[in-house]
Image (cartoon, grey):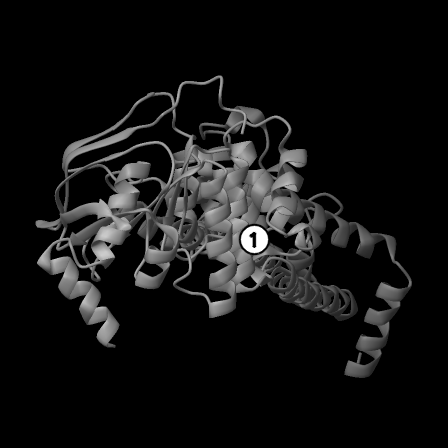
């Protein structure tokens, strides 16, 4: 098959709303969005706490979290694999090779990004707001709701960065999901598999969707910062 | 102001107050009493400890030595402070006031916020993002926000140092009006004309020490310390 007919077939899959194709895209989005949501629920308060709290070992923790932003996806996958495998501590749950395992692995990947970016954003805000909030009796964790709300546009950009990392990675979901057709097959694992099998239209179609998604994420991040500048100053 | 039924937090009694940072004594053995009413201006050269003294009184900093004693001890939110650079939350003007009221647990925050906005001529700007307002509007909002808390004492740190003459005049009118309504005001200023126009009493600080505590007209008549006389004369020479 030549390049142009491959492209034509790929577009055919996208425009024709091929059920197998849609199932893969749907699962990818479901896994990644769930992971980002979990990472936000855990990471936003933790990052804010890390920004306002002072305790021994804080600097070391910040360095650790920043370092974990570069955690290789295959290593995150390996850690979750070990934890969920039959002989692992959570083996009895039977989550290995399921979308749940993929969500856990991607949460692990996104969490350091959310914590680190939240910490940076909130620390800047806190230094600006500290005296006013202290004057109102909002110190320590009591300042966090105000800081998270006022940092909402910058924090949205951080969450989108996390979404970008999770949606593009292949190593972690491949290891813990197993790339089972119709069950744990995502866009990235499909592209890897179908390319090696020679089913280029499906791989290319999924690749185009991934690129469109990346563009959409960047547009959303840009929009968030623009809206923030306009409405929050 | 609905505070007649509560015991006053005044007078404020500051005794032998000292504050050190990095081994340097920045406020050194300052004592004064702040009774109810009037505008008291803290003046002095840069680094004299003016702002630090306000922050210590407001409880933002812990004294290294000495005591700050309010007449009534339950008065945490009955003194408020407005900073030199107003801290504006990334919200609308109204939301800035509502946030402060919510933080101290006021129930009818919305109506009190609207009252405060109207009182300081900001009603038309209620929905404007606070950080996009002009410097003078921001300072008025900061004062409105503090006023909404119904404090007995208002600490103002250089309230007009960042403002143009028109906005400065507006802020001075606001301060004079608040004082006329019975609010007790302790402010720092580097603007001697402003101290003279607004205050009845001067605290002159130099290098962390309280050199003069005297009525404003005495200080400006040159009848206080030689240091204060030199400070005022030096300022007039520029």
Q: In the picture, residue A136 is in which quadrant? A: top left
User: Can residue A43 be seen?
Assistant: no
**In terms of image quadrants, where is residue B102?**
top right
Q: A219 and B140: which one is in front?
A: B140
Residue B188 image offset from top left, x and y in percent: 31, 52
Chain ID at mark 1: B
Residue shown at the point (45%, 40%) measured from the top left: A46
The N terminus of chain B sits in image quarter: top right
Residue occupying image coordinates x 70% and y 63%: A213
- Measured as percent of width and height from the top left, residue A202 is found at 77, 65
Instruction: Check disc 1 and report its element: helix, strand or loop.
Output: loop
Q: Nearer the viewer, residue A67 or A72?
A: A67
Residue at the extreme right of the image, as rendered = A16
- Residue B223 visible in the picture: yes
Please determine whether, in this image, residue A31 is positioned above or below residue B237.
above
Which sits in the foreground, A36 or B67? B67
Name above or below for residue B146 compared with residue B103: below
The one of A53 and B4 positioned closer to us in this rendering: B4
Residue at numbered disc 1: B90
Judged left or right of residue B177, residue A224 is: right
Q: State the residue at coordinates (21%, 64%).
A: B232
Q: Quadrant of the C terminus of chain B?
A: bottom left
Residue B211 is situated, as x and y percent measured from the top left of the image, at: 13, 50
């Amino acid at each position: 098959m030549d390049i142009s007919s491959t492209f034509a077939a790929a577009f055919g899959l996208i425009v024709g709303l091929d059920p197998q194709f849609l199932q893969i895209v749907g699962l990818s989005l479901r896994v990644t969005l769930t992971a980002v949501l979990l990472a936000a629920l855990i990471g936003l308060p933790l990052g804010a706490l890390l920004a306002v709290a002072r305790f021994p070992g804080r600097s070391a923790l910040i360095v650790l979290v920043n370092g974990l932003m570069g955690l290789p996806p295959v290593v995150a996958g390996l850690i979750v694999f070990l934890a969920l495998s039959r002989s692992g501590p959570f083996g009895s749950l039977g989550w290995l090779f399921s979308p749940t395992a993929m969500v856990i692995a991607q949460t692990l990947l996104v969490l350091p990004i959310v914590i680190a970016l939240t910490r940076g954003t909130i620390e800047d805000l806190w230094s600006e707001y500290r005296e006013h909030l202290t004057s109102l009796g909002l110190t320590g964790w009591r300042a966090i709701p105000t800081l998270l709300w006022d940092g909402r546009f910058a924090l949205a950009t951080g969450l989108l960065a996390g979404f970008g990392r999770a949606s593009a990675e292949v190593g972690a979901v491949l290891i813990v999901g197993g790339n089972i057709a119709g069950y744990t097959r995502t866009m990235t694992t499909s592209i890897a598999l179908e390319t090696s099998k020679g089913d280029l239209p499906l791989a290319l179609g999924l690749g185009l969707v991934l690129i469109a998604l990346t563009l959409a994420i960047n547009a959303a991040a840009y929009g968030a910062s623009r809206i923030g500048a306009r409405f929050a100053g | 102001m609905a505070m007649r039924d509560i015991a006053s937090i005044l007078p404020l009694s500051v005794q032998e107050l000292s504050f050190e940072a990095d081994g340097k004594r920045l406020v050194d053995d300052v004592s004064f009493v702040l009774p109810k009413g009037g505008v008291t201006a803290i003046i002095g050269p840069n680094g004299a400890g003016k702002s630090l003294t306000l922050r210590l009184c407001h409880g933002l900093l812990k004294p290294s030595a000495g005591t700050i004693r309010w007449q009534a001890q339950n008065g945490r939110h009955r003194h408020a402070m407005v900073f030199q650079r107003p801290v504006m939350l990334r919200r609308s003007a109204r939301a800035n006031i509502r946030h402060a009221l919510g933080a101290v647990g006021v129930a009818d925050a919305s109506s009190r916020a609207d009252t405060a906005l109207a009182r300081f001529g900001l009603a038309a700007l209620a929905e404007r993002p606070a950080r996009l307002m002009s410097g003078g509007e921001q300072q008025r909002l900061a004062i409105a926000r503090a006023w909404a808390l119904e404090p007995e004492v208002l600490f103002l740190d250089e309230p007009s140092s960042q403002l143009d003459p028109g906005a400065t005049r507006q802020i001075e009118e606001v301060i004079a009006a608040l004082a006329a309504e019975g609010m007790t005001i302790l402010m720092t200023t580097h603007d001697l004309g402003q101290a003279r126009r607004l205050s009845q009493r001067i605290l002159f600080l130099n290098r962390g020490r309280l050199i003069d505590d005297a009525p404003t007209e005495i200080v400006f008549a040159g009848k206080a310390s030689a240091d204060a006389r030199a400070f005022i004369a030096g300022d007039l020479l520029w």
